[in-house]
Image (tube, rainbow, N blue to C red):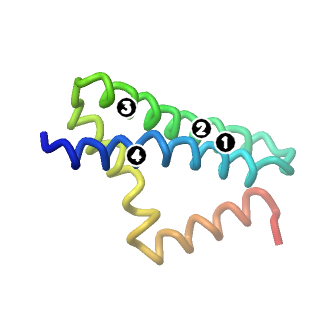
Amino acid sequence: MNVWFRRLLLILTIGGGFVGVARTIQFFSHVDKVIAYVVLLAFVCLYGYGIFLGVKLSEGAAPLRHLRVYFGLQIPFISSLYFRRSLGELASTLLHWP
């Protein structure tokens, strides 16, 4: 694997994982519903998995299949406006946010 590409993946996985955990905890910090804690746990696990993959990548082992799965799970949130809007409406309905 190209050295610069490895470095880019390392920054995206570890940095993005920490930012994702921080933003998720901040977003769900004021909610007292059980479903919110389930969603919080799911996203923290997803971003924790990204941090784990970044650490494995820094050690030299390149789990490309796992990286594809990790980034593939995030593509619908980035590329699809309809999917993002429907998730926002679902969260608003489930958590009774205005």
- Label 4 packing within 10 angstroms: few (<14), some (14-19), many (20+): some
In screen coordinates, is 89 left or right of 47? right
At mark 1, the secondary structure is helix
Q: Earlier in the sequence, mark 2 or mark 3?
A: 2
The residue positioned farthest toward the bottom in the image shown: 81
Please give the residue where the numbered disc 2 appears in the rendered image.
Answer: 44
Q: CA distance from mark 1 to mark 3?
A: 20 Å
The residue positioned farthest toward the front in the image shown: 3
Q: Nearer the viewer, mark 1 or mark 3?
A: 3
As drawn, 3 above or below 92: above
Residue contact at pointers 1 and 2, CB within 8 angstroms: yes
Q: Residue at x 73, y 54 (%)?
A: 27
At mark 2, the secondary structure is helix
In screen coordinates, is 59 left or right of 49? left
Q: Position of residue 39 (x, y in %)?
A: 64, 44
Q: Position of residue 82 (x, y in %)?
A: 47, 76
Please give the residue where the numbered disc 4 appears in the rendered image.
Answer: 11
Q: CA distance from mark 4 to mark 1?
A: 23 Å
Please give the residue where the numbered disc 3 appears in the rendered image.
Answer: 53
At mark 3, the secondary structure is helix
Q: Earlier in the sequence, mark 4 or mark 3?
A: 4
